[in-house]
Image (cartoon, rainbow, N blue to C red):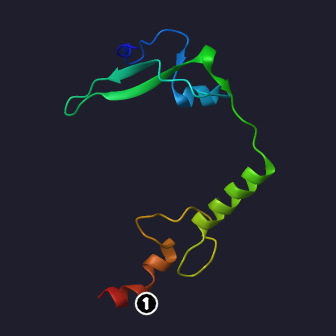
């Protein structure tokens, strides 16, 4: 198979979609190869590239099973739990901080860093 067809940003023909667009339609690529690509020019670096898939070959999204839902809930709980104070922060802990904001801003921590 030759090179992929390349289209300029917002000028792709009907029947192609990105992964996000497929997901919004309730579809997934389903093992098909990339059919084309979009390129958005940028001034300072190379172009932004988005890969396109054919909508007619896409498959429906697999339904969420109870086991997958439980695993996802467990993973999200781990992301929300502060490793320092062991409380649910109510948001995903920023990886740049490594702890919840109150623990990061605490005076005891600042004394250790000085």
Direction left: furthest residue: 44
Q: Quadrant of the C terminus?
A: bottom left
Q: Position of residue 25 (x, y in %)?
A: 65, 25
Q: Is residue 7 above or below residue 42?
A: above
Q: Nearer the viewer, residue 103 or 3?
A: 3
Residue marked by disc 1: 108
Find numbered disc 1 in the image and state the secondary structure of the residue it sits on: helix
Q: Nearer the viewer, residue 108 or 82?
A: 82
Q: Quadrant of the N terminus?
A: top left
Lateral position of residue 47 relative to residue 23, left or right: left
Q: How many numbered markers are drawn? A: 1
Q: Is residue 69 above or below residue 37?
A: below
| Residue pictured at 44% horizontal, 78% vertical | 105
Residue neighbourhood size for the residue with mark 1, other residues' Cα within 10 Å, grouped as few (<14), some (14–19), many (≥20): few
Lateral position of residue 58 relative to residue 112, left or right: right
| Residue pictured at 59% horizontal, 17% vertical | 55
Q: Is residue 100 above or below residue 57?
A: below
Q: Is residue 17 above or below residue 76?
A: above
Q: Position of residue 81 (x, y in %)?
A: 60, 71
Q: Position of residue 24 (x, y in %)?
A: 63, 29
Direction right: furthest residue: 66
């Amino acid at each position: 198979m030759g090179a992929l067809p390349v289209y300029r940003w917002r000028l792709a023909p009907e029947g192609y979609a990105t992964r996000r667009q497929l997901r919004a339609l309730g579809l997934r690529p389903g093992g098909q190869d990339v059919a084309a690509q979009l390129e958005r020019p940028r001034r300072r670096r190379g172009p932004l590239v988005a890969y396109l898939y054919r909508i007619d070959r896409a498959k429906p999204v697999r339904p969420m099973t109870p086991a997958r839902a439980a695993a996802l809930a467990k993973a999200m709980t781990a992301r929300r739990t502060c490793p320092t104070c062991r409380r649910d922060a109510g948001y995903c802990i920023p990886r740049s901080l490594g702890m919840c904001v109150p623990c990061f801003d605490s005076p005891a921590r600042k004394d250790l860093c000085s």
